[in-house]
Image (cartoon, coloured by chain):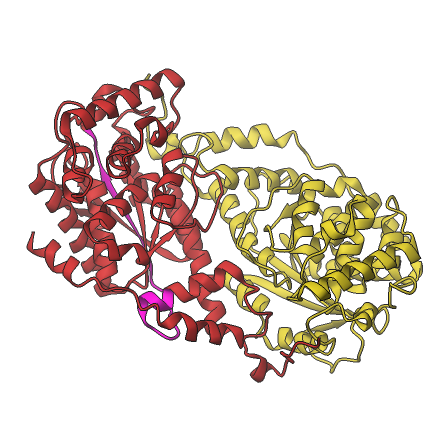
Chain colours: A red, B yellow
Amino acid sequence: MQILNNTVSRIERIDFSLAEETQQRLDRLTKPQGSLGRLEELAKQVVEITRVHSPDLTHKVVFVMAGDHGVTAEGVSAFPKEVTPQMVYNFLKGGAGINVLARHVGARVVVADLGVAVDLASHSGLIVRKVNYGTGNMSKGPAMTRQDAVRSIENGIEIFEAEYKKGVNLAATGEMGIGNTTAASAIVAAITGLAVEAVTGKGTGIDIAAWQKKVAVIGQALLVNKPDPKDGIDVLAKVGGFEIGGLVGVILAAAARRVPVVVDGFISSAAALVAVVIEPKVKDYLIASHASVEIGHKIVWEYLSLRPVLDLNLRLGEGTGAALAMGIVEAGVKILTRMSTFETAGVASQVTQ
Amino acid sequence: MQILNNTVSRIERIDFSLAEETQQRLDRLTKPQGSLGRLEELAKQVVEITRVHSPDLTHKVVFVMAGDHGVTAEGVSAFPKEVTPQMVYNFLKGGAGINVLARHVGARVVVADLGVAVDLASHSGLIVRKVNYGTGNMSKGPAMTRQDAVRSIENGIEIFEAEYKKGVNLAATGEMGIGNTTAASAIVAAITGLAVEAVTGKGTGIDIAAWQKKVAVIGQALLVNKPDPKDGIDVLAKVGGFEIGGLVGVILAAAARRVPVVVDGFISSAAALVAVVIEPKVKDYLIASHASVEIGHKIVWEYLSLRPVLDLNLRLGEGTGAALAMGIVEAGVKILTRMSTFETAGVASQVTQ
């Protein structure tokens, strides 16, 4: 709990006072004022977060955390849980969607086992911070103990800190865990108070009957566990997952280090929600990467008042949408730092009428 | 007219028969089927256009064409027309928004003078294919002769062809021309038959009174010139611009070479509309880059049944939105060509229920 408390205590409000000065700099660049819309907003947010006048986002890191879910015993997923370790190996070999997209935007991928149900073969690229061999079946009791919830968050913090030493200018979240959309829906229903049906989607691709079962299982989990919506750790412990806890830790640690965090899909957004419940100041460090097909995703963005950068009908997770959005965020920052001003370019800026 | 006719005659229907086979390949990749949404659609479109099984989009080129507009005499723009040549110099020095964003996605920028009102200082990076020193004031007569309209298109074709010899896997359109949103609105009103008010926006940033004047000027131009909506060259000649004609040429030439074209903002979309009127098969070669703030932009996308890739509240032009979208298109193609399959990665693909 010491690591978590220390991290949270270091999170400061972002410096909104830098917005005006940054907008003035943007307005001196050779373009009509405000004409680069969202790119300008992203540049301003990065300055407010980092408090760096001309940020450089060279070091981009996608944190991909894996964990298994006991609730898969209820048949809530379209894929068998063996896919979790198989996909971790795929990440390590560089053949998954997140590897391709991270390379495309020049980001590193950090792969960590927070709670896969089997022991994974050792690999130089794999960080093993396993809290347990998968969570318990949340429809019958808590997914994990409160102690393990804290441990998963602290593992995430330590993974971020180790990476921060190598350089992290922009962080993104990603995950792999068969069954984790079920956990994410339960978290979002618990924290927002919305009906389970309103926040539960088709995950990786289930039919109507399976969806109804998923909704019933989540309803049961909330009934059995009664998570306290004001206590993020309680929600995580009762209906969360180890990889989700790890991402909560990454988000808190990034905020404490003034590093902007690009939040990926629905599961990542549920982790962001838990982080914001733990420390509301975290919200302003977040960038919503994309609007996914999962219905609960949109609800989380609205609840956090975040507007997604992209809308590409993605529903893969792993950090794929966040990686693409990182490219857009970096583009915004380059606009601020690399464009010529009217003065240096010798371009007239005055309005003629 | 020979060059234009030859180019148009070489444009074939894209090969829709490749979609199914490509989707099957996408479905063997380590991800739930269809879970990369728009990225998968873009990859399929690129295969249908290029007829290449595993396309490579290394050579990305943004064609930025500049020209002046006689209609600026009516006071329709927020910037003086001297900004057109000043911005061309800015493009050549690499300090404009398009330079920054093209570098960000690894694209080359090709800068061409199709009809700037002054002679520009020579520069190794500047292609001079000037048709005339700015167009005529379209509110008083045609913007250019039909012969000059054809010449502007053929100049665009030849600029593309010269660049194609160096390698163009993916093309994007961009432009600079103070007053050219007025021309674009006139083109869109002429071709779609919609009211001028419905397709006219604030350009680089004018107030209500100036907007009303702009609408009146465009209405006058349509009344005086009566462009034939079925004749793309007639529309271009009467209410278009030289840089817009150049982009029509780039689009036609790219389609003839089976190169996908990412269409930028409102002015570029008006050029795309003219190209589609000239040869309807061109439509399937186009990728709508983004939904800009200009109201007419959305109307063109709907008219062409194209769905924009990005929505970032941009309204700069120059090719900036297209450059960003090129990065997303290339990401989609890399998903197709660089991800592992379930088989090679040893990941279970079967559904368990």
| Segment colored magenta | A46-69
Answer left or right for B250 relative to A42.
right
Seen in the picture, residue A93 relative to B321 is either above or below; the reply is: above
Answer left or right for A175 relative to A348.
left
Which quarter of the image is occupied by the C terminus of chain B?
top left
Residue A100 horizontal/vertical position (percent): 41, 47
Q: Is residue A56 magenta?
A: yes
Residue B136 horizontal/vertical position (percent): 88, 68
Identify the residue shown where x is 71% and y is 65%.
B209
Residue B103 horizontal/vertical position (percent): 53, 65
In this view, the residue in front, A328 or A288, is A288
Answer left or right for A128 relative to A41.
left
Q: Is residue A41 magenta?
A: no
Identify the residue shown where x is 11% and y is 56%.
A5
Query: Based on the displayed image, in which of its 4 quarters is residue B247 positioned?
Result: bottom right
Identify the residue shown where x is 24% and y is 40%.
A66
Single out the residue that lies furthest toward the front: B209
Q: Quick check: can you spot residue A294?
A: yes
Q: Quick check: can you spot residue A203?
A: no
Residue A129 horizontal/vertical position (percent): 14, 46
